[in-house]
Image (cartoon, helix red, strand yellow):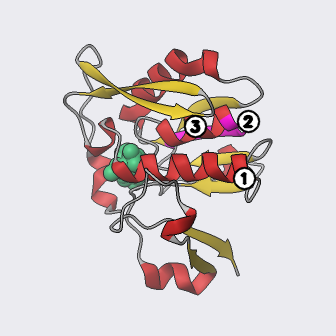
Amino acid sequence: MDGDMDIVTDSMDLSKSFIRQLECCSSTLQIHQAEIGDVGCVVWDAALVLAKYLELGHEKGSEDINGKKVIELGAGTGIVGLCAAIIGANVVITDLPQFLPLMQLNIDNNKSSIHSGHIEASVLSWNDEIDKLLPLPDYLIMSDVIYYEEDMQRDFRIKEIRQEDLDDVYRSDDIHVLRLKRK
Ligand SMILES: C[S@@+](CC[C@H](N)C(=O)[O-])C[C@H]1O[C@@H](n2cnc3c(N)ncnc32)[C@H](O)[C@@H]1O
């Protein structure tokens, strides 16, 4: 994503929010979205698709993040990371500073659904050193953040998850779930 977004500092008015619900592992996540704010103040469709794919991996045991350390980049509302924590992962959701209150609000409102997992919110700009989040996670997850495929191919093996391996309902031909593994 364009680095220019780093200079956006508008604060969000969290008194004007509306709720998005998502079922995850028999819990119902209640996610606050801000009426006014930068792009991350609402849940994007790609986040729903990724969250339900993580749930499916847990249920089927095909790729279970239960017990794994997970960092989410550009988390926005934090919905994907919250789903990962419900699954049982140890999660840090990260975004630019102005998103910290929204991420924290959503953690506070959903913590009763998190049992074996853990979640916290932290500020992390993609220009920052990742030192403060060491040790390195088992998984980095991100939804609806733009990347340059050529850069990725240099360092990662990229596999696209087949549509039929995504959740039956939460999938769409124009949303692609990619799994990247370091070369
Ligand atoms: C389109 S939103 C997606 C939000 C969320 N992942 C979702 O799918 O609902 C892109 C997110 O990337 C974050 N972002 C943009 N530039 C960033 C940067 N330089 N460092 C960290 N986060 C950034 C934005 O603040 C925003 O939350």
For marks 1 and 3 on the same chain, the one whose residue lies earlier in the sequence: 1
- Say which residue label 1 marks: 60
Position of residue 71 in the picture relative to residue 77 (left or right):
right
In the rendered view, tell whether residue 115 sits above or below residue 178: above
Q: Is residue 41 magenta?
A: no
Under circle 3, the secondary element is helix
In the rendered view, tell whether residue 19 sits above or below residue 60: above
Q: Residue at x 53, y 72 (%)?
A: 162
CA distance separating discs 2 and 1: 15 Å
Q: Amino acid at mark 2?
A: Gly
Q: Which is in the foreground here, disc 2 or disc 1?
A: 1
CA distance separating discs 2 and 3: 9 Å
Label 2 CB less than 8 angstroms from ligand 1 = no
Q: Position of residue 32 (x, y in %)?
A: 36, 24
Instruction: Please give the label number shown on residue 88.
Output: 2
Position of residue 95 in the picture relative to residue 8 (left or right):
right
- Say which residue label 3 marks: 83
Q: Position of residue 165 (x, y in %)?
A: 57, 64
Q: Position of residue 169 (x, y in %)?
A: 43, 50
Residue range (magenta): 87-94
Q: Amino acid at mark 1?
A: Lys
